[in-house]
Amino acid sequence: MTSPEQTPETPPRTGDGSARTPFAWWDWDLGSDRITVQGHAQKLPSFPPCDLPSTGAAWCEHIHPDDAPRFAASIDACITGEAAEGCCEHRIRQCDGSWRWVLCVSRVTARDPAGRAASVGGVTVDVAASMLRDEILLRDAQMLSRVKQSIVCTDLKGIVTYWSEGAEELYGWTASEMVGRPFYDRMPTEAMREHARFRMATAASRGEFQHEREDYRKDGTRIYVESRVFAQRDVAGRVVGVIGTARDITARRRAEQERLELERQLLQAQKMETIGTLAGGVAHEFNNLLASIIGNVELAMLTHPDDTRFRGCHDAVLASSWRARDLVRRILTFSRSNDPERRLSQLHPLVTDGIRLVRSILPATMEVACDPAEPPAGMPSLWADANQIHQVIMNLAANAGYALRERAGLILFRIRQIAFTEPHACASVTLPPGSYLVLDVIDDGCGIEAQHLPRIFDPFFTTKPVGEGSGLGLSVVHNIVCGHGGGIDVRSTPGSGTVFTLYFPAVVAGADGASAAQKPARGALPRGHGEHIAVIDDEESVGAFVEGSLRALGYSTRRYRSADEFYTELASSQDPLDLVLTDQNMPRLSGLGLARRLREAGMRTPIAIASGHSPDLTEAALLPLGRVALIEKPFALEKLADTVAELLARRRDAPGARVAVPE
């Protein structure tokens, strides 16, 4: 049993050290309710100067109302013996009215003979600074948990020690799944894990590492992040780990990729426009050469029909020339950048023309075939833009070629017909019941994984490595086919190949201008009866063969080397003129320009304009001129004879009517 005068052991004092001590010793006499503070003129050390209350009741009045019940409970627990020691953090009012946090630790220091508490002693410690630190830590923790950026802390071995809510949102892994595990364990490839180790090591040794990288979420979604990794140090300045921040830049990277792709498309469009321009110029020259070759061979066969010694040679020259003409036409068709122009067409020729184009871009080890090889009888037509259908064939063939890149294989284009009695669901569209032309594009390549099939028509989606694909090829195919009123199905088995099935609405014979009439058998060429025809062509060889052919067919001709030469002589000539046959592309004045000038002067003479490639010779440009026909170079003698005969047959009653031509 201790006496009421006994107090807890007090620390030694030297000089005025108690004024700097962050705690005060006190003793509370329960009988008198007096409180005695040990040291420094009854001023609580580390507090602003203030006279402290001298009684327990007065002291309680300085405790924050919210904290008073807890303080009283801790003291009562000591007095009643429920606890050997009372401990309570509470706020105490300072002289300026503000509140300051203190820690009060108390215990019974003396008891009366009956064992009741006679006095309580204790120590009050200023904990405002530590409470402020705790509040700051709590605030920072709450702030970090709300930051949308990913924040991850690891030790020097890469073990995660902190995983923020932002990291959970970015990567899809929860803190409970990642804390205690190596940060790089979640990465799918060893290369990515090795780079993560490199980033951590660099940040630890150099202080910081910044970069952008490709990453993956828990569900396998590919993302792009901008990351900063820096060293984490302890109070002694030693590096104890790294802190990494990351933010999602996937949308920005995709926007950049789309911008680059649009720039690439613009550049490609400019290239195609340039190719089209060059192709037009080359076609003009090449068609003139072909026209001269074809015309002179046919003229020789016409003028010497009984000479069969060189008939085989002539036929071979003509066959090669027609193949060269078809090649020029395909190049021109593919290089044109005009708006879609749909015409009633047969699918088989469109496909075979496209196959001829794709053979040049595929290795010789890959076989490309069309089934059936010849146009099937009775097959309906379709409204189609030839250039777009060729684009579809090129894209699908390139896709199949990539699937077969490591070995030889077959790419088969199969044409058939089908009729749906009920709506048919395709990729993103549902086709109404009806008759359709079907084009199956079949390859026996590597196939497409099942998880990729739902996305293969999405723009910019590709499974090819970076730099090997834009992700637009199949998207373009899908848009073109759907734009034609059709749809696409796709079936694929990894390791066995892929089948793309394209549906195009069929046009039955007789509908919308379709006709199943067969071309009549060719009889003798129509001949003239001395009608006078002006032949205008700046190409000597072409003009000579046209003039010779017309004369062989019974026409009277006069040849001119330019439109200006013809127009100048026309003003003074009194010779009858039944027809004008002019080239389109000539210096100073084109064939279309000459036709317009003649019509403005009042001449109604029929005009035939020959051209291998001219965007100006549209139906809208020719129709107002009346009795003007277009003959495409290089043309056969048969085409020349038919065009001239048809124009002359439609002459007015006064075909040779003359008008004054202004000088």
Image (cartoon, helix red, strand yellow):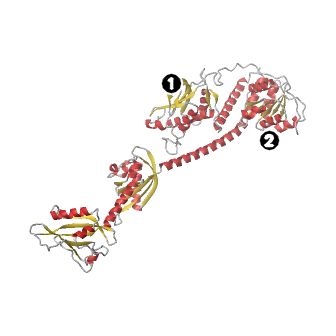
Quarter of the picture holding the N terminus? bottom left
465 or 591, which is in the foreground?
Answer: 591
Q: Residue furthest bottom?
A: 15
Q: Nearer the viewer, mark 1 or mark 2?
A: 1
Q: Position of residue 422 (x, y in %)?
A: 50, 24
Say which residue appears at 46% left-offset and 55% top-offset.
211
Give the Cα separation between the discs numbered 1 and 2.
61 Å
Q: Residues within 10 Å of mark 2 (few under 14, many from 20)?
A: few
- Quadrant in the picture for the C terminus: top right
Taking the spot 68% from the left edge, 41% from the top edge, the residue there is: 277
Given the image, on which type of amino acid does mark 2 rest?
A: Arg
- The answer to whether residue 185 is left or right of residue 54 is right
Q: Quadrant of residue 264?
A: top right
**Which quarter of the picture shows residue 291?**
top right
From the image, tell me which residue sits under label 1.
422
Residue type for callout 1: Glu
Residue under numbered circle 2: 588
